[in-house]
Amino acid sequence: MASSEVTKRSQTVPVVGGATPRPPPAGPVIDLRVDKGLPTPAYLQLRDKLRGAIDSGAWPTGQALPSERDLAVSLGLSRMTVRRAFEELVAGGMVEQRQGSGTYVRSRRLEQTIDRVIGFTDEARLLGFRPGSRLLEVTRVPADAVVAQALRCPLGAPVLRLKRIRTADDVPLALQVAHLRSSMITLQGETLERFGSLYRTLEAVFGVKPVRARQTITARLPTREERTVLAIGARLPVLALERTTYDEADEPFEYVRSAYRGDRYALGLDLRAPEGG
């Protein structure tokens, strides 16, 4: 079996190809060879091989891919073929190209499917991420006009405000500010951190379960606080979510505003045709 070595940062990963044989270094062997005898175009075969290496974790987030030139030489392909494979991965959101630096594996996006009421913690776990949270603030505040309308309480009524940074695989993903109705104002930050999930905490402490929610989504530029917390630039859009969540009595108990990184969060809609349509 012939192999060539492609150096990425300080890590050397052997890539199986058609170049002059060399002793393989330690580490996983990534077979990127394509079969030119197949009807599937070579660039699509290479795209799928590269995608497989990323999905398997052989190339983790932040890892630089071999250069177009190295892959073309190693695999006996044209630079154009390799470039088209890279373009497919960029379009699919799996890699990003940095001017003058190379092509790197991107962080996976967390995609929320909007067909159910579920908290961030459970959503992230279902999608294969490790959820995390950093509690910034637990404060009793008077309800402003927006919060009072959402929670159906008098203007100025005491409510509990929770501000948290939500993470996926230790990467900051969102800044969330939640307001809970007056009957939950005794909730302690230590209790929330012990349970991890807000909805699990509310069920355990107050016997309240989410049944339905009303959510709106807009895209906008981040505030200064969001740029700092999420470590993003001023021109990277965020997805701004506002949600009011209702209990089994159809009474609102939570109003939350969230700002998600637009490059690491996506919203999925399950759409069905109307009956008889």
Image: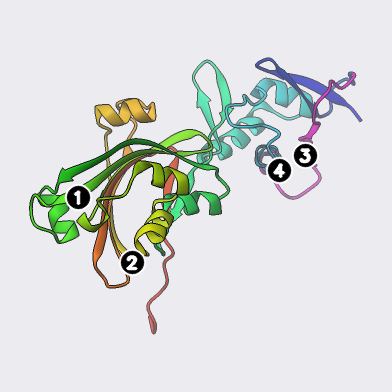
Does the residue at mark 1 contact the one at mark 2 (Cβ under 8 Å)? no
Report if residue 29 lies within the magenta region: yes
Magenta stretch encompasses residue 113: no
Give, as a three-letter code, the residue at label 1. Val
Q: Amino acid at mark 3?
A: Val
Q: CA distance from mark 4 to mark 2?
A: 44 Å
Q: Which mark is residue 212?
A: 2
Confirm whether residue 268 shows in the render: no
Q: Nearer the viewer, residue 236 or 16?
A: 236
Q: Earlier in the sequence, mark 4 or mark 2?
A: 4
Residue at 51% x, 39% y: name it.
93
Please identify, in this view, whether the residue under mark 4 or under mark 2 is nearer the observer: 2
Label 4–label 3 contact, CB within 8 A = yes
Between marks 3 and 1 in the image, the one whose residue lies nearer the viewer: 1
From this view, report whether residue 106 is shown above or below residue 239. Answer: above
On residue 34, the disc is: 3
Cα–Cα gap, marks 3 and 1: 61 Å
Q: Which mark is residue 19?
A: none
Picture quadrant of residue 19: top right
- The residue located at (56%, 35%) in the rendering is 87
Nearest to N terminus: mark 3 or mark 1: 3
State the extent of the magenta-drawn residues as a range. 23-46
Q: What residue is shown with label 1?
A: 159
Q: Amino acid at mark 4?
A: Gln
Q: Residue 45 shows which numbered tag? A: 4
Q: CA distance from mark 2 to mark 3?
A: 50 Å
Alpha-carbon neighbours of circle 3 within 10 Å: few (<14), some, or many (≥20)? many
Q: What percent of the width, then of the height, locates residue 111?
A: 47, 50
Of the residues under marks 1 and 2, which one precedes in the sequence? 1
